[in-house]
Image (spheres, grey):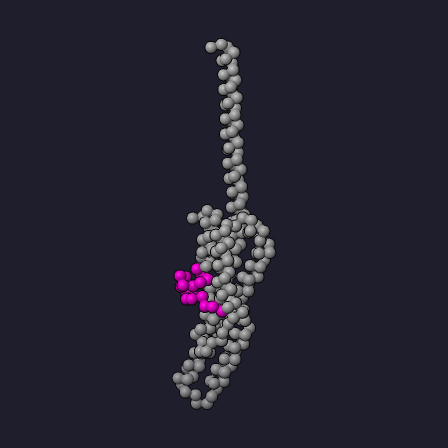
């Protein structure tokens, strides 16, 4: 083999080696870039999802109609009409108080009225908390949409978006249409708890948390 051929092969070997090294380096850099982009996206989503979870956890687990169901002839709630339901309960409370002032009222009747008064006061306390948390959640949700909508639309996975829509439908059914949540204390028969759990799981899956 001539010296020229050996030299040529040597040069080709060096060139090929350089090309292989260059290609390997490019692949490594592209992989590192993709990893950094994925981590940046995950960091952004993590912050967004933390905010969203805080908001959806503010929504009460009961419908106002669930709260008043133990009252005799309870008022009906719909369309965020907390003031109307409070007014109705106040009238009922006034009527019960007047009945207690009837002279020589029957013992059993008196006991029933006192129980009803207790139920009404308990319901009013529950409704006050329900109202405060509901409107706080609504306010925080509006702020979230106004500040994070662009980033949300850009990065959030479709399954999370679908679960959020289902959660919002449940909230509308409960606090606008006045539907019951089912059984408030049963996580498997409470529409808000179920929808919230599905949404949180979707967010966890979207950022790779098992």
In the displayed structure, 28 sits above or below 122; it is above
Instruction: Give the residue displayed 46% in from the left and 58% down from the top.
Output: 196
Q: Main secondary structure of the magenta part?
A: loop
Q: Is residue 89 above or below residue 55?
A: below
- The magenta region covers 178-194
- Considering every residue shown, the one lying at the far bottom of the view is 103
Q: Give the percent coordinates (x, y) of residue 137.
A: 54, 61
Where's residue 22, x and y in %? 53, 27
Image quarter for residue 184?
Answer: bottom left
Instruction: Count all numbered tags in the image, as a single digit.
Output: 0
Q: Position of residue 40 (x, y in %)?
A: 54, 43
Residue 179 drawn in magenta: yes
Residue 118 at what x, y percent from top left?
A: 45, 76
The reply to whether residue 33 is visible in this rendering is yes
Quadrant of residue 138 in the image? bottom right
Q: Residue furthest right?
A: 146
Q: What residue lies at 50% left-to-right and 23% top-to-bottom?
A: 17
Give me the residue at 51% from left, 64% from top: 172
Which residue sits at x=54%, y=66%?
132
Q: Nearer the viewer, residue 109 or 103?
A: 109
Farthest residue to the top: give it: 2
Q: Is residue 149 magenta-colored?
A: no
Q: Is residue 118 visible?
A: no
Q: Is residue 136 left or right of residue 202?
A: right
- Work out whether residue 180 or residue 108 is closer to the camera in this orientation and state it: 180
């Amino acid at each position: 083999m001539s010296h020229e051929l050996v030299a040529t092969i040597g040069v080709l070997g060096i060139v090929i080696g350089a090309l292989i090294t260059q290609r390997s380096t490019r692949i490594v850099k592209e992989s590192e870039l993709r990893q950094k982009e994925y981590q940046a996206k995950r960091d952004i989503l993590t912050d967004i999802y933390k905010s969203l979870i805080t908001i959806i956890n503010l929504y009460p687990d009961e419908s106002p109609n669930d709260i008043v169901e133990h009252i005799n002839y309870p008022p009906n709630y719909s369309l965020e009409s907390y003031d109307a339901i409070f007014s109705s309960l106040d009238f009922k409370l006034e009527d019960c108080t007047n009945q207690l002032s009837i002279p020589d009222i029957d013992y059993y009747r008196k006991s029933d009225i006192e129980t009803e008064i207790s139920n009404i006061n308990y319901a009013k306390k529950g409704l006050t908390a329900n109202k405060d948390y509901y409107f706080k959640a609504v306010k925080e949700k509006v702020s979230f949409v106004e500040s994070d909508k662009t980033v949300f639309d850009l990065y959030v996975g479709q399954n999370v978006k679908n679960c959020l829509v289902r959660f919002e439908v449940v909230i509308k059914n409960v606090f606008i249409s006045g539907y019951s949540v089912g059984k408030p204390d049963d996580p498997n028969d409470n529409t808000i708890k179920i929808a919230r759990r599905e949404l949180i799981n979707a967010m966890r899956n979207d950022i790779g948390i098992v």
